[in-house]
Image (cartoon, helix red, strand yellow):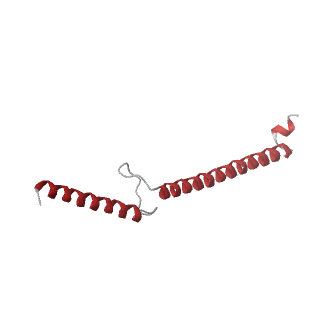
Amino acid sequence: MTKKNFVFSFAISLICTIFAIIQKNKLMQTIDTYKLTSMEEPSDEILAQIMHEAALDAKYKGEEAHKRYFDQLRKMANETVQIWNNPKSSIATAQ
């Protein structure tokens, strides 16, 4: 075997090994094991799951904020009605 053939066969085996390791890591990559870094990109499945969970979280937080907002409006409206209906209130007697 010539030196050139030896280097070529070594490079091919090294490339195959690296490719196999990369493929194994992609198969092992799950939402629980994936770390969001600039060094590796998520698989399409992982990215879809991350986006789905972010959308669900945003929807939940939006619904909660909406509920709190209207609960606060109802509370303020009830307090205003009570003030207006109170005969001892300065607002009620100012008419």
Q: Position of residue 92 (x, y in %)?
A: 85, 39
Task: Choose between 90 and 67: the one closer to the eye.
Answer: 67
Task: Choose between 93 and 62: the one closer to the eye.
Answer: 62
Q: Position of residue 82 (x, y in %)?
A: 81, 47
Q: Is residue 48 left or right of residue 73?
A: left
User: Given the current orientation, which residue lies at the most extreme front position?
Assistant: 1
Q: Residue at x 76, y 49 (%)?
A: 74
User: Given the current orientation, which residue lies at the most extreme right position?
Assistant: 95
Q: Is residue 3 left or right of residue 10?
A: left
Q: Position of residue 67 (x, y in %)?
A: 69, 52
| The N terminus lies in quadrant | bottom left
Q: Residue at x 77, y 47 (%)?
A: 79
Task: Choose between 69 and 44: the one closer to the eye.
Answer: 44
Q: Is residue 87 left or right of residue 37?
A: right
| The C terminus lies in quadrant | top right
Q: Residue at x 59, y 51 (%)?
A: 58
Q: Position of residue 64 (x, y in %)?
A: 65, 53
Q: Residue at x 41, y 59 (%)?
A: 34
